[in-house]
Image (spheres, rainbow, N blue to C red):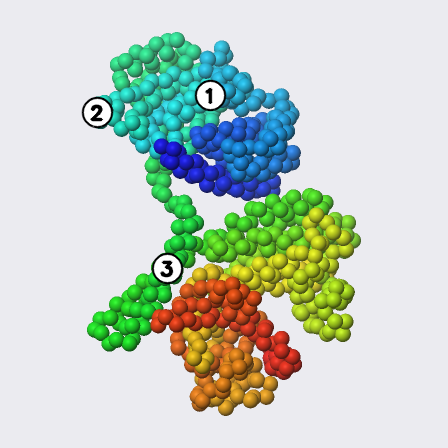
Amino acid sequence: MDASLDNFKRKFIEEAVDLIDELEKTVLELEENTGDMDIVQRIFRIMHTLKGNSSMFGFEQIDRFTHHMETIYDQVRSGEREVTQATLDATLRSVDHLKNLLEEAGNESAALMQEQETLMQQMDAIIEGRAVATAPKKEGDGLEPSTTAPAQQQGASGKEYETFFIRYAPVTDIFNNGTNPLYQVDELQALGTAKIKVHFDKVPPLEEIEPSFCYTSWEILLATDKGQNAIDDVFIFVENDSDLEIQRLDAGNLLENQRFVAALDDLWVKQATPNIEDIRKIIPQPEPEVQVETTTAVAQTNQMAAAARQNAAKNVAISSIRVASEKLDELMNLVSELVTTQARLTLFAEENDLPGLTVISENVQKLSRQLRDIAFSIVLIPIENLITRFHRLVRDLSQGLHKDVRFLTEGSDTELDKTIIEGLADPLMHILRNSLDHGIEDVETREKAGKPRQGTVRLKAFYSGTNVMIQVSDDGAGIDPAAVHNKAVEKGIIPPDRKLSRRETLDLVFMPGFSTAKKVTDVSGRGVGMDVVKRKISELRGEVELDSERGVGTTITIKLPLTLSIIDGLLVKVDETSYVIPLSAVDKIYAVEHEKVVNQFNDVVVLDGKQIPFFNLRKEFNLPETKLTMEQVIVVHFEERKVGFVVDTVVGEYQAVLKPLGRHYKNQDMISGATILGDGTVALVMDTNRIIKHFTAKEEFAMGSLQVANENKK
């Protein structure tokens, strides 16, 4: 039983994390449009769900704290108060506090509790800022539950009373979901005056009773001034686990009419489960000829609305399920092993001419590729998961720096491997901090420069081939290449006489210890940041580039692979060693005579009428010259150019399962990993961009072939 309870609590924590993240995102949406009642309603329902779930699983502090937050937004959605900046600030601070409460659940520190009391006092001040009534309190919250009938037809909230009929029949295994139906019945009673009939007709004989099942259902007449929204909120997280009917009977408080109550008792004696029309017939009608018509019209309207709600609840299909990330990791590992085994099967089929084996091998290859693609789609998650925290970061930093900044996003549905998403958070955080601190100017400076008062930071994500591009741009002051060059000389990063291109100068920003900040702030300027960005992105097999124009703004572009585990590659051989070149980098393959690529001036070959600089991998890897008369030139994309790799032979396409090289080779970056071939040998996976950058660092090539490439670039 304890283990089962622990499982429920773990499930609650997982759901609570999602709810709190969604709450933060929705509050930031509300800040952009404070009059949108649909957003207010979403915020209230998130809070109500979080409060109900935390109460159910014994997270008392979260329940208590969320109740105060819920009260404020209940007043907003009922029109009793407006959304103010103070309300939004308090809500966002409360979101942070909820995250801390969730982390320390059951072991809350004194400091955390002190912070909670302070926040609750602030919320109480907001609630009591006007002469309005608070939302209904639960028993134990300091107010008596309103279970007695009011003496008048208007409640404390100033709204008219209405009487509702509710039929609530939970599914028998509802306890397995951690739900106690009595909580819903108690909450209904707290909304006003209730008359309840309990049904035990489905309880089986004693010997057939399952102790963990719920056999009870309820019929409830409720008179309340809180409206149907409050009733719907009671059942917000059990509506799909019950047969639920909610209908409005009449205006006013029928339960204070003794004639109606007596007639209802008599009806319940005669009929075990009277329908709604039978109950309507016993409602006292002072003006039958008018009231019956009105009541019938209201009844039909409410009946249709209730039927629509019930049908919607019953037709809800499970569109997604929650899966532990460890299971997804294990799935990808198994798919990787399957791909490796399939390669061995393909090789075995080629080496053994057995009837039918080739067909089986081809089918397994097709199925493994389909399974690989499906597994990829499962572990890929939208970058939107990172966006909310960045919205909050920009909001808080812009206020702290006294700058007016708006944060725009595009392509938030672009998906990446969850491992890459996890490693991307810190680099993007550094970039955004720098954009706000160094990039966006203060209001006075922007006005003097003829710019809008409000600065803009934009995060854009999109697909480019098999890669994902993420761009963070701002319309700030931009970067002065001369200032960067002087700072690099001052710090001893480059010699004074070193001549650099504009791109090379801007790339100095990514050097360790480089910072153009004139003073140290809490945001940036300590000489760390952009070098961390480059290192972190490199660890994800990605690249980062910076482009900036003085007075216009800065754009940082991150290029990332879709996934880190399996790639489509081109298998080639150089001497006795196999290599895999990612297909995403390959432009074209040419068969070239050996004489055309050996001892060529400036290492340039003419292909399709264009001069292409190339690397002879045998020469670069210090291997003996080949005796082959024909070699293959693999032309790959490199930034805005094309560069060739000369290899001995091209074996063909290959699904490469990437494996790390191990800690002994962690300091090299030309090889991004290794893969096991079908015959058990190892092939090295090339990182073409880094190989080209490594070789072009050699002075003779930088002054030769790349110069030709630049002249031929179009």
Residues under labels 2 and 3: Cα distance? Answer: 49 Å
Quadrant of residue 698 within the rendered picture: bottom right
Residue 360 as seen in the image, left or right of residue 470? left
Residue 335's disc is: 3
Up-down relation of residue 179 to residue 638 (above or below): above
Label 1: state its secondary structure: loop
Q: Secondary structure at mark 3?
A: helix
Q: Position of residue 110 (x, y in %)?
A: 60, 31
Percent position (x, y) of residue 392? 60, 45
Q: Is label 2 in contact with label 3 (beta carbons under 8 Å)?
A: no
Q: Which one is earlier in the sequence, the residue at label 2 or at label 1?
A: 1
Residue at horizontal 30%, vertical 21%?
199
Does residue 528 show up?
yes
**Nearer to the camera, 579 or 35:** 579
Tell me the distance, in whole angstroms, between the alpha carbons under discs 3 and 1: 54 Å
What residue lies at 67% left-to-right and 69% top-to-bottom?
Answer: 504
